[in-house]
Amino acid sequence: MKNAPVAQAERLSQRAEQPEHHPKATQPLIFVFIVLLSVAGAIIGMQILTTLGITPNTALIGVLVAIVVSRIPVHALRSFRSIHAQNLIQSSISAATFGAANSLLLPIGIPMCVGRPDLVPTMLLGATMGMLIDLAMLYWFFDSRLFPGSAVWPHGVAAAEAILAGDQGGRRAAVLGNGTAAGIVGSSSVFGFLAPLVGMGGLPMSAFDVAFIGNTWALFMFAVGLLVRAYCPTLLKVDFDGLLVPHGMMIGAGLVALTQAILMITRKRQDAVGRAGLAGCWSDTEWNRRRRVKRSVSGTKHCG
């Protein structure tokens, strides 16, 4: 018969080899928590959109609330200590915030601005259908060439780092706490004396944070746009905003992005058809390798 230390070591080894249980959003406690936070996130998003014209990133709020709840000494709340449960919570509140503010509230404001309130129900119906289609597309296309999972995704990286910091504790949790305190102080009225300069009661700490985790080229072009907007009316006597130049550039960039997306989807389908025709010959790895060879060496044939 095995002694106690050996048996305990074997049990721990078997437990480590088993995959971690992934909680489901339909679990009663997690579901109720997700619904409450989603309602709060939708209210926050619509309120800030109508007052400041921007949509906040509430994913970090969901992470922090989940971490705080998981530390409450109640056995029923221990499920919130799972990083997967915290990820479900932050994803839900973020989706509710952007969905309610950007996808639903913003479109129905357009008929009101043009003096056609009778079009609000029709616009709301179309916006709801568009939001549902977007959700399906994001689910299907994430981690593909269209939306690569290895991209920067600043808001997602920030939420993931916050989850890991709360799970691991120690120095990472201390840094997270210090950053949270700095964001609160910077956004509060402590710097109210700068209101004439920045045009708001506090410092734009969210923009300052994105500078550390955003894409370098995207932020560089954003900075160039800010400089052009600030100095061109004075130096060149040209008001690009009044000439609708930024609006045209955004439309052009959107058309290019749409064209690229269509080409990627079409190419993916062609690859799927090609693989189906060679299902008995090549594996996926071999197919990808031969595609790369074909691109670099002209005249390469699929069947050797």
Image (cartoon, rainbow, N blue to C red):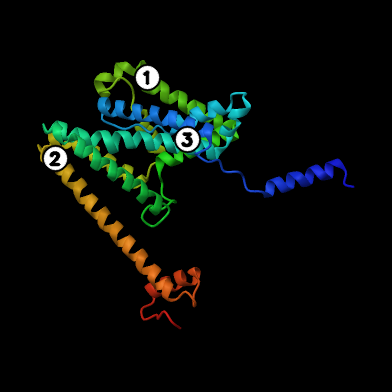
Whichever of callouts 1 and 3 sits on the residue coming sooner in the sequence is 3
Residue found at the far right of this picture: 1
* Label annotation for residue 95: none
Disc 2 versus disc 3: nearer the observer: 3
Amino acid type at mark 1? Ser
Q: CA distance from mark 1 to mark 3?
A: 26 Å
User: Is there any visible trace of residue 35 in the rendered image?
Assistant: yes
The residue lying at 78 percent from left, 47 percent from top is: 10
Give x and y (percent) for residue 235.
13, 36
The residue lying at 48 percent from left, 68 percent from top is: 284
**Label 2 belongs to which residue?**
240
**Label 3 belongs to which residue?**
89
**Kind of element beneath mark 2:** loop
Depth check: 253 or 17 in front?
17
**Kind of element beneath mark 3:** helix
Callout 1: few (<14), some (14-19), or many (20+) C-alpha neighbours within 10 Å? some
Q: Are marks 2 and 3 in contact (CB under 8 Å)?
A: no
